[in-house]
Image (cartoon, rainbow, N blue to C red):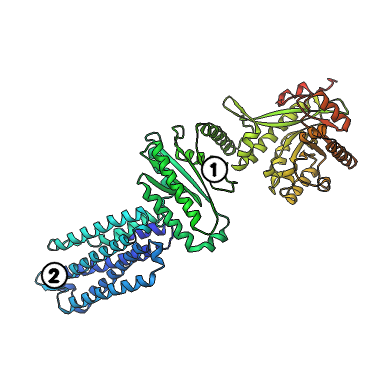
Amino acid sequence: MISILALVTVFYSKPRKTFVFRFVIAGLFWSILSSALQIIILKVANDPEHLYNRYLFMALILGFLIAYNAVLFLIFSYVDMMSIHRRGQRKEFFLMYTVLALLYTIGAIIEIASGRIYIMQVNGIDLSHFIRFYSFAGIVCSIICFYASVTNRKDISRIVWKTVCIVVLFEIVLLGIQILLLQSHVIFTGLSYSLVFMLAYLLFHAEKYDEISGCQGINALNQYISKLCGKKKFHILYVYFIFPSSENLVDEGMNLALKGIKACRSVEAISPKIRMFQGAENRYVDVIERCSDKEARNYVNQIRGIFDWLKAEIYMPFNYMMIFGEVYKELDDPIKIRQFYDYISKRFVDMNNSYFYTTTREDLEEFEEYYKISKALKDIRNSQNEDDDRVVVYAQPIYSVEKESFRVAESLMRLKIGDSIITPDKFIPIAEQSGCIHMLSCIMINKVCKAIEQLSEFYDFDAISVNISSKELSNPTMYQDFLDIIEKYDIDMGKIRMEVTETAMFENYDMAQRNMEILDKEGIQLYLDDFGTGYSSLERVINCPVKTIKFDKTLLYKSLDDNRMDDILTYMIEVFKKNGFVTLVEGVEDASQQQFSVDKGFDYIQGYHFAKPEPIEELKNFFSRKSKF
């Protein structure tokens, strides 16, 4: 029943199908067969008068002995093949087991030939010799398994070693008790193999441990940390290995695997206070508990030395990133802890050398803000509320040189969390990474359309623009949701405009071009924002369906100080105007910059010199009011 239950569990779960998994599956099948044969043998032995047939009974005994030999072979193979070294010595392994199987067969033949394998009695069949024989064979197999593990101790993980010690002791004791209690008429040897395969599955194939590295998985990490959070002081070492390419990993082959295993064994040997876990690919977490800061740092320095040895030992160049620190009480959740270390690691992913970093309180404060923003953004995305109050719309009016008044404005997104107003430079990158940016854009367009509808009734203005993320511009269906929102309002399409950055527009030029052409066809004018910060050519810009070129403030500032840049700026403005583009400059902060911009021929000017961003409702203070008639 145990073997059947384990087998059913395997087929209805998603086990880790490692090299040794085949031995578990085969072992469960042979366990079921062995147990079934044993049940039949015992049934016949208890009622020989009605069920006994000499030849059939002997066939059952032979069948069981063969099945039990297969079970012993699979247990021995599973334990021995836990070592990657042993996998390279399979010929020697099979030769050795062939000798053992031969001895087992000779012993069985002697028992059968002597007529002692079973004895007919008045009240049934005595199976004492039969049970004693195979139980003794099981004890011998257990001792050999233990010996194989001892001789290979340096190459197997701590958890495998502990498991072997416990299982071997359990096997020897269980089978020894079975031999001593033969007169009790109770047979329980089936537990000696069914529980072994059940335990092997639960430990090493049900996402618990990796039998080679000895690491546990992400679920085990979460459970372990949950027990420690808020109760015990502990430290975490976050390790990320950066390899050059998968091709190099393949080329390095077995050498890398063997050296990596040796490194794992060396880390385990430092202290039993270190527990190893594997997260995502090439990411590992070592949890160090029950020690002082000084002791934990000493352990980490030893681990660092192991990794430096590994770098020197293998031919393929690689780097590692180690982030170490005490887990602060504010990090009271395993997922939050993992996010903290992932957050810190992003600072160093582009480093071209190995890096070690110790976390500080300042890191925690910075992460707390990141975590707060990330949590709010995900909640906004999941809420799917286009009127979400946490997205606040500000706007900055833009001065028209020709009409000497404010005719357009740029809407600017802010995030409100509690009493804090978060600026875009802090939350937009997080929103793009976490897949929340589209929902934010939809909310912005919805709120800007609502503001346009309300302002249009009483105020005279041309349009309000909305910034579009680079992630949006590369999305083949980005325009559809935006147009659906705009069409809900009774506004002229020309009243809302969209700004795309130069860099974003050329990350995926063909897709960006297609999206912009569709928006342009629908009557939505496009601005090319931050012109001068990217690397596009004038020819490419001119061929894009944008109406307004928005010069970045850096071009303005450089032109004020450099005559060569001044000439280049003059030339670009002339080219754009000649080709029918509207020119706009941003970042104007004083009267001299304003006069310079007017002299250069810019059509629109934006900057703190005219107005700072304010809640969009305040645009009524800048736009001209319509005549009441």
Q: Circle 2 is placed at which residue position?
A: 126
- Does residue 199 sit above or below 500 in this rendering? below
- For the residue marked with disc 1, what is the amino acid? Ser
Q: Residue 196: x and y, percent?
A: 30, 59
Splitting the image into 4 quarters, where does residue 383 fall?
top right
- Does residue 93 sit above or below 405 in this rendering? below
Q: Please name whichever residue, 489 or 600, is drawn nearer the observer in this view of the structure.
A: 600
The residues tagged by marks 2 and 1 sit, at their Cα atoms, a distance apart of 69 Å
Q: Circle 1 is placed at which residue position?
A: 345
Q: Please name whichever residue, 134 or 10, is drawn nearer the observer in this view of the structure.
A: 134
Q: Residue 217: x and y, percent?
A: 43, 50
The structure residue drawn at horizontal position 38% and vertical position 72%, both measured from the top left corner, is 91
Circles 2 and 1, Cβ within 8 Å, touching? The answer is no
Q: Quadrant of the N terminus?
A: bottom left
- Does residue 116 sit above or below 264 in this rendering? below
Which mark is first along the chain, 1 or 2?
Answer: 2
